Image (cartoon, rainbow, N blue to C red):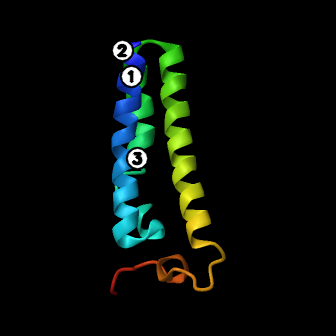
Amino acid sequence: LLPYLSAIVETSIPFAALLVTAQYVGPAYALLTPAPFMFPLLIVLSTLRLDFKLSVFTGAVAAIQYWFVSLVYIHKTGVVSTVEPILVSAPPRRAQ
């Protein structure tokens, strides 16, 4: 029971960081912060406990939390009348 509780707490830290960041900079920009990239790292690190069920559980918890964030911000914004500039701008490139 304790490893499963620990997995929930560990994956909730980037989840909370993602929610807080999305409140301040917007959901599209929050996905460019390091918080969402922590989910795969935590899933991979859960394999070090050498328990397949715990790794699957950690992956499921991370997927549910990420899915919850997407649902909250899709329903919060509703129909998007304006597109975030970061989604339509050209990628940065080096000066020649």
Residue 78 screen position, x and y as percent: 63, 72
Residue 5: mark in rendering: 1
Image position, residue 88 (x, y; %): 55, 81
The kind of secondary structure element at disc 3 is: helix
Residue at horizontal 51 percent and vertical 80 percent from the top:
84
Label 2, label 3: how many angstroms apart (C-alpha)? Answer: 20 Å
Circle 2: element type: helix
Q: Are marks 2 and 3 in contact (CB under 8 Å)?
A: no
Residue 67 locus on image (x, y percent): 57, 48
**Amino acid type assigned to the residue bearing label 1 in the image:** Leu
Which image quadrant: the C terminus? bottom left
Query: Could you tell me if the residues under marks 2 and 1 are in contact, i.e. CB atoms within 8 Å?
Result: yes
Outermost residue on the front side: it is 76
Report the quarter where the N terminus lies.
top left
Graded by Cα atoms within 10 Å as few (under 14), some (14 to 19) or many (20 or more), the crowding at tag 3 reads many
Q: Quadrant of residue 41?
A: top left
Considering every residue shown, the one lying at the far right of the view is: 79
Element under disc 1:
helix
Task: Tell me if residue 7 can be seen.
Answer: yes
Find disc 2 in the rendering and name its residue.
2
State the residue position of label 3.
15
Spatial distance from mark 3 to mark 1, Cα to Cα? 15 Å
**Sequence order check: which comes first, mark 3 or mark 1?**
1
Residue 46 located left or right of residue 57: left
Q: Amino acid at mark 3?
A: Phe
> Closer to the camera, 75 or 38?
75
> Vertically, is 39 above or below 3?
below
Closer to the camera in the image, 75 or 49: 75
Q: Is 32 drawn above or below residue 36 in the view shown?
A: below
**Residue drawn 42% across the image and 51% down it:** 36
Amino acid type, callout 2: Leu
